[in-house]
Amino acid sequence: MITTAFTTRLRASGFDSGARDGPPMLASSLGGIREKLVYGDIVSLSNQPVSIEDVAYTWEVPKLWNKTIEAHRREVRGAIVNTTVGLVAEHGLLSVSMSRIAEETGIGRATLYKYFADVETILSAWLERHIDAHLAHLAEVRDHASNARERLAGVLEAYAVHAHESHEHRDSELVAVLHRDKQIARREHQLHDMLRDLLSEAAQTGIVRDDVSPAELAGYCLHALAAASTLPSKAAVRRLVAVTLDGLQPSAGRLGGAQTVSPR
């Protein structure tokens, strides 16, 4: 237990001096007494005179403060999510039950149900966490680039590399189920909006074609780079990014554009 000392300064007319022999009553129960609590050094009350103006007292408080409790809950939640993802990866979605998750996590079923209603809810939490971390990484790449061209190329490459690296950890059935979740859809819209804004900026500087809306180009990029998940190497992923960027170039001088170039 942790001993905490508080200093209470009381100013009130008609204060009963007999209250010195024990802790003063709180202002909430004594009309007219103004009370101010401030943290102070730990003070021993034994054999020490106590004044009305400056009354110190101590009591025992639990070690688990609110922040510690919240941290504990986050740890339990994280352990549940990680355990579930591991079980699904090893045994498949249909083979995982709440009882199995509770057993593998080392908690009771009643505790597990306080955190999540079912397996799908747990996996949705995992995918939300996964996408949030991915969005944060893309934002970091964007913010560290010095110009519009670098921002667009950097984010597209980071997105493609991520798709390539995470493919082996994904279960197509699992992803199909989870992508129906509204929170997941909202996060995917955030990704689309990030690319749309980058493409809009690039189009204004003449780097990207302006005959197609930035929103449509963002969809093109996401669908094109989704193929990175099937590629055998990062070198192949970078070639895919280069081809995707090439398709974003202004249309003049390109096949299908306002001007065409004869093949050599």
Image (cartoon, rainbow, N blue to C red):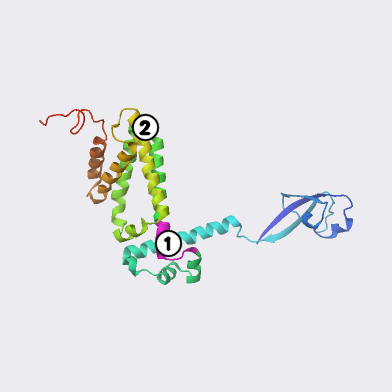
- Secondary structure at badge 1 equals helix
Q: Does the magenta run of residues contain 121?
A: yes
Please tell me which residue is depicted at 52% across the width and 60% down the height of the picture: 73
- Nearest the viewer among 77 and 204 is 204
Which quadrant does the N terminus fall into?
A: bottom right
Q: Does the magenta run of residues contain 180?
A: no
Q: Which amino acid does label 1 sit on?
A: Thr
Q: Which amino acid does label 2 sit on?
A: Glu
Question: Would residue 227 be found to the left or right of residue 38 on screen?
Answer: left
Q: Where is residue 69 in the image (x, y as percent from the top left)?
A: 57, 59
- Nearest the viewer among 234 and 207 is 207
For residue 211, which quarter of the picture?
Answer: top left
Measure how far apart labels 2 and 1 are at the Cα level.
37 Å
Tell me which secondary structure the magenta stretch mostly adopts: helix
Q: Earlier in the sequence, mark 2 or mark 1?
A: 1
Q: Name the residue under label 2.
A: 201
Residues in magenta? Answer: 115-126
Please tell me which residue is depicted at 69% across the width and 61% down the height of the picture: 60
Circles 2 and 1, Cβ within 8 Å, touching? The answer is: no
Q: Mark 1 points at which residue?
A: 121
Which quadrant does the C terminus fall into?
A: top left
Determine if residue 75 is in view: yes
